[in-house]
């Protein structure tokens, strides 16, 4: 998907440690880039939602190797028709399998069902915020999420790729 | 209990919790990195209030954007209200959304269905 979106320069392209200050910077960039007017409010919120959920997930659950700062990656590309958000980090095999299972399940649900499912999970007492975040992402980008896991240096590199159509209500 | 008031930041919402009025307002954006650090003092205030609540409690939500962990906290507050008032007559929940903001209206409707309680959806 990414190659198709590369017709314009990336809005953000980053490799390194993803922390709170970087997330705040990404939010500022999105605020500046996508205007909060009537026509683009939904698009703005969805791009913010996808980005924040991906980044906070990496910040909370990513595995950092202090000798290698190149594996935390976050990018936003734009084409005429859509935004594409790519994030990757090192994680456990278990997390990778969970993400793939959740995406497969989420892709079988409609947007309304995803919102309802997110609320159901959020109302549970368990502290599974990563799972809730993934369903929030799926609802925001109408199920256009893919996840790849690649083994590297005794851990997994998990890459999430989310496409957000610019057309309203898609 | 004195009112608890917080100004909004780019990541955290404006808060007005006033136990004397039974009013609990959350408005703006909510995606704190450490959701516990931000919301735990608010939840403590809310739970203390629920020990001796006013005859009517209002949870007034006006969110532009929230992350999934913030929604978890909001659902926890709603769950506490539902447990305290099983008859569901002594409190109201307001969900405000911008005019023509179909997404947030849809979320409010879904939330209402989820909790089985008629949330007031108010267009602003």
Image: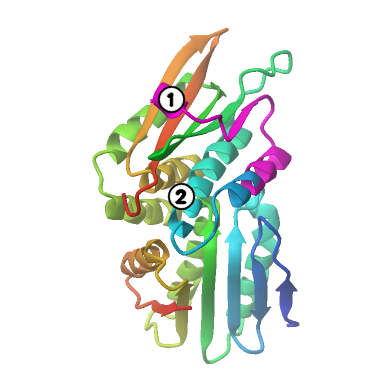
Left or right of residue A21, residue B108 in this image: left
Q: Crowding at label 2, few (<14), some or many (≥20) Cα neighbours within 10 Å?
A: many
Q: What element carries label 1?
A: helix
**Quadrant of the rendered image containing residue A13:** top right
Q: What element carries label 2?
A: helix
Left or right of residue A2, residue B53 in this image: right
Q: Which quadrant of the rendered structure holds the N terminus of chain A?
A: top left
> Which residue sits furthest top?
A153
Q: In this view, does A143 lie above or below A88?
A: below
- Where does the magenta region start and end? A1-28
Q: Crowding at label 1, few (<14), some or many (≥20) Cα neighbours within 10 Å?
A: some
How far across and how far down the image is residue B52, in percent?
A: 61, 84
Location of mark 2 (residue): A46
Residue sitting nearer the eye, A60 or A127: A60
| Residue A2: numbered disc | 1
Chain to which the residue tagged by mark 1 belongs: A
Residue sitting nearer the eye, B105 or A2: A2
How many numbered marks, from 0 up?
Answer: 2
How far across and how far down the image is residue A165, in percent?
A: 37, 43
Residue A4 falls inside the magenta stretch: yes
- Residue under the image location 69 percent in, 65 percent down: B8
- Which marked residue is nearer to the observer: mark 1 or mark 2? 1
Q: In this view, does A33 lie above or below B103?
A: above
- Residue under the image location 46 percent in, 74 percent down: B95
| Cα distance between the residues tagged 1 and 2 | 18 Å
Residue sitting nearer the eye, B34 or A55: A55
């Amino acid at each position: 998907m990414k190659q198709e979106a590369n017709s314009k320069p990336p809005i953000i392209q980053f490799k390194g440690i993803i922390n709170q200050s970087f997330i705040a910077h990404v939010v500022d960039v999105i605020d500046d880039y996508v205007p909060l007017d009537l026509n683009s409010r939904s698009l703005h919120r969805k791009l913010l939602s996808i980005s924040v959920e991906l980044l906070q997930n990496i910040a909370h659950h990513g595995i950092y190797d202090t000798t290698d700062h190149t594996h935390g990656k976050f990018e936003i590309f734009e084409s005429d028709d859509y935004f594409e958000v790519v994030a990757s980090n090192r994680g456990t095999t278990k997390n990778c399998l969970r993400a793939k299972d959740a995406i497969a399940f989420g892709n079988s649900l409609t947007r309304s069902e995803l919102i309802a499912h997110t609320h159901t999970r959020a109302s549970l007492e368990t502290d599974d915020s990563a799972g809730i975040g993934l369903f929030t992402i799926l609802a925001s980008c109408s199920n256009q999420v893919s996840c790849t896991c690649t083994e590297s240096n005794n851990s997994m590199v998990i890459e999430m790729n989310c496409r957000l159509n610019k057309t309203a209500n898609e | 209990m004195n009112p608890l008031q917080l100004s909004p930041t780019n990541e955290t919402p404006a808060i007005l919790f006033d136990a004397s009025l039974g009013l609990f307002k959350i408005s703006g954006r909510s995606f704190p990195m450490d959701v516990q650090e931000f919301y735990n003092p608010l939840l403590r205030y809310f739970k203390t209030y629920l020990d001796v609540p006013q005859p009517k409690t209002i949870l007034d939500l006006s969110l532009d954007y929230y992350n999934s962990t913030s929604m978890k906290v909001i659902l926890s507050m709603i769950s506490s209200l539902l447990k305290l008032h099983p008859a569901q007559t002594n409190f109201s929940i307001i969900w405000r959304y911008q005019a023509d903001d179909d997404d947030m209206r849809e979320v409010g409707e879904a939330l209402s269905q989820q909790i089985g309680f008629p949330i007031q959806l108010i267009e602003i």
